[in-house]
Image (cartoon, coloured by chain):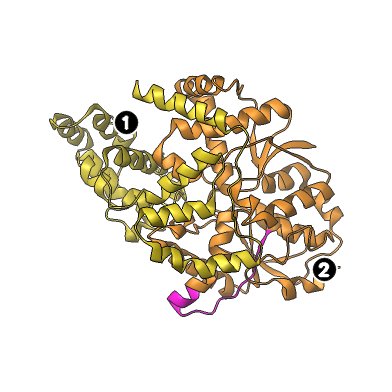
Amino acid sequence: MAYSYYPGCSQEVSTKAYDHSSRAVAKALGIELIEIDDWNCCGSSPSYSLRDVESYALNARNLALAERDVPDGDLVTICNGCFGMMDKTNRRLGDDATLRKEVAEALAVADLEYRGTLTVRHLLDVLVKDLGREKIESKVTHPLEGLKVAPYLGCAFSRPSGIDDTEFPTALDDLLSWIGAEVVEYPLKAACCGGILMMSERQDVALKLVHTLLTEAVRRGATCLATACPLCHLNVEAYQGQVNSRFGTDFSLPVLFFTQLLGVSMGLGRQDLGLGEELVSAKTLLAPFMT
Amino acid sequence: MPADTVQMARREPELSPEQEAILHRPELLKCIQCGTCSASCPTAYAMDYTPRQIIAALRAGRLEKVLRSNTPWLCASCYYCTVRCPAEIQFTDLMYELKRMAVRRSFYPRGSPALYKAFVSTVDRYGRSAETELMIRYYLSRHNPLGLLKLAPFGLKMLLRKRFPLLPHRIKGRGDLHKILDHIAQKGEA
């Protein structure tokens, strides 16, 4: 199975563990991820907040490159934010003839064309739907028995895309249960982390959301959170200190990408999975499952 | 009655065609003011107008008040309002549209788009986002070097885990990217 692969800017340095672990598990599962040559940023919500056609064109360039180089494969990303922008662009280009023409004219200036043949996917969705339970279970050598994980999927995986239930997405619960983890019932699994508000002047608003997410995870008995998005990941992991000083709490909850947990269950090594780069160490937590 | 309020809005003399367009989005007429959007919004408590009030104010022709409010800038783009709206109003997309309109007219609470502008300037220059430069540009644009200094411990922690981006990645095709963006900008002005 071959797919075009779009890692996303965050995965270059600050959350490169997500990129590394995604490539490692894909390889071990027999999925070929072909990185889009010279891809550009999806523009994320800031670009779409300031201009619309330009934002669609940013994403259309990536779609055009992916379609040109891997014409028969879906385009796979691992970031909820990139997934949301690329999926929105793909759908709008399909529905809106005026926009399609404007974007096509702009792409033509750079000798690019997008024919609209791709489907934009999230790696989690690919693993759950295209591979499925049997295939994944067959690769599990170190089931994560007794590891209490809160599945935190955040917003843009299922909203507005609809690739999973928009209120009660189950893809992450399923995957975690297949690899032997004890999936904690986590009602906030599709709630918002505050997104880019965390970097803005209204950090207080985002910290309050993260405080709620952490409180509920701990109350439900989780010993770690699993994420499928670098922005969710950064907000719930790197800002625990700020949450603690603002709310007088004492959170020290490891946060791991779902690909890292999957990789551990498949017996992959620490280095392949980018383990050790966490700000809240998961070393002790994962020690029983490491070879 | 919704239809009447829109009629009133149309009679306001100072409205530009662009303002008319947003006040007369047909989907706004479908709003029954049930408040599902506001109840679903995780940041509504901090907003000048809740999502439900935004639609009410737009129907009453109060576009400038809406654009000067902090509401669009507190939207975290979670899309709960959109997927739950019984009238299928694309409220999150409306928030994006209001942000774009506020920026074009310079009607916004002081500083609101600064972070977004800093982000977009690095993306357009390099073809990738550059987190470190973004934060430097953002804090300097807000004349807040102290804020930048406060980020130092965070930066150091990231640096120790080899997660601190020092230099931006420049894509090879940034000439092409600039041509694409310039083409659209020029068409917009024509």
Quote the CA–CA distance across marks 1 and 2: 58 Å
Q: Which mark is residue A290?
A: 2
Position of B94 with respect to A64 (left or right) is: left
* The quarter of the displayed image where residue B1 is located: top left
Q: Is A256 a magenta residue?
A: yes
Q: Amino acid at mark 2?
A: Met
Q: Which mark is residue B26?
A: 1
| Chain letter for the yellow colouring in the rendering | B
Classify A195 as above or below B182: below
Q: Is residue A94 visible?
A: yes
Q: Residues within 10 Å of mark 1 (few under 14, many from 20)?
A: few
Of B109 and A211, nearer the camera is B109
Q: Give the percent coordinates (x, y) of residue B84.
A: 44, 47
Position of A16 with respect to B185 (left or right) is: right
Classify B181 as above or below A164: above
| Chain letter for the orange colouring in the rendering | A
Q: Residues within 10 Å of mark 2 (few under 14, many from 20)?
A: some
Report the span colored magenta.
Answer: A243-257
Q: Is B97 a magenta residue?
A: no
Residue at 72 percent of width and 48 percent of height: A128
- Quadrant into which the C terminus of chain A falls: bottom right
Residue at 37 percent of width and 43 percent of height: B95
